[in-house]
Amino acid sequence: METDTSFAPMAEEFLHRTSDIIWCTATTVDSKGRPRSRILHPIWQVTNGLPVGWVVTGRTPIKTAPLAANPHLARMYWNPAQHTVSIDCLASWVSWVSDLDTRRHVFDLFMTTPPPLGYDLGAFGPKEHESEVVTPLRLDAWRVQMLRPEQLAAMDLVPRTWRR
């Protein structure tokens, strides 16, 4: 398997694929080691040369307990054309009290990114970044794999991989 040590060669295709597919499955593991999957809508950026994702969500017990026990998440993007992007990452909640700049950045990111990737957070309650209704969840990727449909057709099942 070919592994890139720099994310730069993959960055453009990664951002294109995740922005095009939009929705991904996200799997966490609870305190008893049981996996749980859900659908999420992150927006990814490349920050200091590394992939960083943002999710705006409610900080509910069903989300906070598994992440407190194990902050690792597995993400999988797939579309009918057979493009896949799998992402392993660490998740961390953005502090409502001490990190208003990051909250403002994430709120503005979702509000100003054109639909369907971006969307009006006001439809779900918050009218501004200081709302307690939602909390940004930061995703710091440590491994990304991408596979293209032409690889499947050629039976070349070795994905392009980046590992931090």
Image (tube, rainbow, N blue to C red):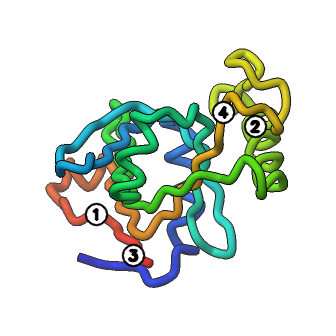
Could you tell me which secondary element the residue under label 3 belongs to?
Answer: strand
Q: CA distance from mark 1 to mark 4?
A: 35 Å
Q: Earlier in the sequence, mark 2 or mark 4?
A: 2
The residue located at (77%, 39%) in the rendering is 107
Q: Is residue 29 above or below residue 37?
A: below
Q: Nearer the viewer, mark 1 or mark 3?
A: 3
Q: CA distance from mark 4 to mark 3?
A: 31 Å
Label of residue 159 in the image: 1
Q: Earlier in the sequence, mark 2 or mark 1?
A: 2
Could you tell me which secondary element the residue under label 4 belongs to?
Answer: loop
Q: Is residue 146 visible?
A: no
Q: Residue furthest top?
A: 123
Q: Amino acid at mark 2?
A: Thr
Label of residue 134 in the image: 4
Could you tell me which secondary element the residue under label 2 belongs to?
Answer: loop
Q: Is residue 114 above or below residue 158?
A: above
